[in-house]
Image (cartoon, grey):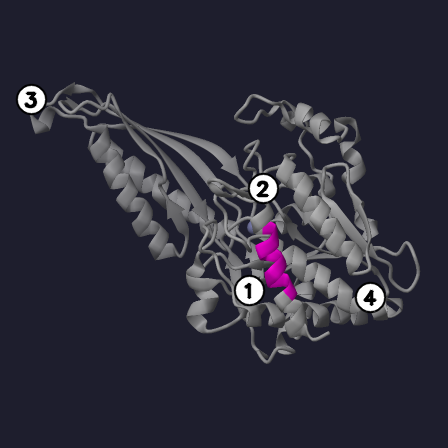
């Protein structure tokens, strides 16, 4: 079977999965739902057909294993996720799972030459659509499941623990999904880029250097709410003027430093047409290729906001609500992926960092990670118009297969 035929099968299966999990509002596959059951069953059949031994783990992840030269060797894991955001596209996550399955199918006839096993994993929850917390499937596999999640509830008030029982899983057994570092050789993930950089450079594939960890803040600017008609400019302590300046400063400093800085929420109080705003609450999301870059941008933003607020007699209150470290990809696996991409005709592949989070971030807690990006049309993702080229999928498959043999040669 040619790689072109395998790529055509991957495209058809992305369509098939989209079809069977289409809701009136678009594609949605959420954790521990009927759609989850359906996509696991389908993934299990694809894995079995490719020659893998299949099982569902204690967190609801669908797994498949190809033994190497002898049974029971540590595994090289190739994975991504099958869950989606609401009204999702057809390729985010699933493309990486299907590339893994097709890679395993191509490896299977030669598996006795592999010094490790190959496992393909379809993670059950990466997006956090149902319970808010993200990377649930990969955190379970990495052994970093947070017990606080059992009490997390979905929109209907169903707790995570109850949803486990309803799905036929036992919360008490969650540790069974965890893998020990000595049982793993490494972790590879192929994923659509979800950004425009590869397409802009005319490259089908790219290497990932790191996955940006975000810092998120809740910021409040306090002034004084007063009658808009009766309060002269020099008497005003207008919190919204402070917040407006803050939004502009955030963008300016982000651009200057090559950091992604976003204010996504902003609310003025009391929010009346004839009252000077006395308080504004807004959010800030910061991400960059390295923690140093991100943290120094925050220092400058904080200083700029503090100084402007002082000039305007406003008070700035800062609360950090989330912080995740940037995760670096392993130089060894990145080099192996570079050999793989070179096989497709690009001997000096583009390296970029991931602005979005991925399962690989969680798996980095337990093994070395490497990531391959495939170009996506116009950088569109988390949207029904998400699209990839079948020819790029064939190239990604070629690159992954070569990568596995490169890792094998160095093992
Ligand atoms: Zn994804």
> Of helix, strand and loop, which one carries label 2?
loop
Quarter of the image with the C terminus is: bottom right
Q: Which residue is mark 3?
A: 229
- Residue 6 in percent (x, y) is at 67, 68
Q: Is the CB–ligand 1 distance for label 4 below 8 Å?
A: no
> Of helix, strand and loop, which one carries label 4?
helix
What residue appears at the point 30 percent right and 38 percent down from the top-left corner? Answer: 305
Cα distance between the residues tagged 3 and 2? 52 Å
Q: Which residue is mark 4?
A: 108
Give left or right: position of 159 versus 288: right
Cα distance between the residues tagged 4 and 2? 30 Å
Give left or right: position of 107 versus 197: right
User: What is the quadrant of residue 127 in the picture?
Assistant: top right
Do the residues bearing badges 4 and 1 touch, measured as CB atoms within 8 Å? no
**Front-most of 92 and 334?**
92
Q: Which residue is mark 1?
A: 374
- Residue 378 in percent (x, y) is at 41, 62
Cα distance between the residues tagged 3 and 4? 77 Å
Q: Which residue is mark 2?
A: 29
Q: Reading the chain from its start, which is encountered first: label 3 or label 2?
A: 2
- Residue 158 in percent (x, y) is at 60, 23
> Of the residues tagged 1 and 3, which is closer to the observer?
1
72 over 207 or under it: above or below: above
Disc number at residue 114? none
Q: Which residues are magenta?
A: 9-17
Q: Reading the chain from its start, which is encountered first: label 2 or label 1?
A: 2
């Amino acid at each position: 079977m040619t790689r072109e035929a395998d790529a055509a099968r991957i495209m058809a299966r992305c369509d098939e999965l989209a079809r069977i999990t289409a809701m009136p509002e678009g594609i949605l596959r959420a954790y521990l739902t009927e759609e989850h059951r359906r996509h696991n069953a389908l993934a299990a059949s694809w894995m079995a057909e490719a020659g893998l031994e299949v099982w569902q783990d204690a967190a609801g992840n669908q797994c498949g294993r190809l033994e190497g030269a002898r049974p029971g060797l540590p595994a090289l894991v190739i994975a991504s996720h099958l869950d989606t955001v609401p009204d999702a596209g057809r390729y985010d996550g699933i493309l990486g799972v299907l590339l893994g399955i097709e890679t395993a199918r191509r490896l299977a006839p030669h598996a006795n030459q592999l010094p490790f096993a190959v496992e393909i994993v379809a993670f059950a929850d990466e997006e956090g659509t149902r319970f808010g917390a993200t990377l649930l499937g990969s955190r379970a596999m990495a052994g970093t499941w947070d017990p606080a999640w059992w009490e997390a509830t979905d929109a209907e008030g169903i707790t995570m623990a109850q949803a486990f029982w309803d799905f036929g899983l036992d919360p008490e057994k969650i540790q069974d999904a965890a893998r020990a570092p000595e049982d793993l050789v490494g972790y590879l993930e192929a994923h659509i880029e979800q950004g425009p950089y590869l397409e802009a450079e005319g490259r089908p594939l790219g290497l990932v250097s790191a996955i940006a960890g975000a810092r998120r803040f809740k910021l409040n600017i306090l002034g004084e709410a007063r009658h808009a008609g009766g309060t002269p400019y020099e008497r005003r302590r207008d919190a919204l003027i402070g917040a407006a300046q803050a939004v502009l400063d955030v963008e300016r400093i982000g651009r200057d430093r090559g950091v992604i800085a976003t204010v996504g929420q902003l609310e003025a109080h009391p929010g009346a047409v004839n009252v000077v705003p006395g308080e504004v609450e807004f959010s800030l999301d910061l991400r960059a290729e390295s923690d140093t870059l991100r943290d120094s941008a925050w220092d400058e933003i904080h200083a700029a906001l503090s100084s402007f607020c002082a000039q305007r007699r406003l008070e700035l209150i800062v609360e950090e609500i989330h912080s995740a470290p940037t995760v670096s990809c392993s130089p060894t696996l990145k080099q192996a992926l570079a050999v793989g991409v070179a096989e497709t005709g690009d001997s000096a592949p583009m390296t970029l960092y991931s602005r979005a989070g991925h399962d690989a971030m969680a798996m980095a807690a337990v093994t070395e990670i490497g990531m391959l990006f495939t170009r996506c049309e116009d950088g569109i993702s988390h949207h029904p118009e998400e699209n990839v080229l079948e020819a790029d999928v064939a190239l990604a498959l070629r690159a992954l297969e070569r990568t596995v043999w490169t890792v094998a040669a160095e093992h």
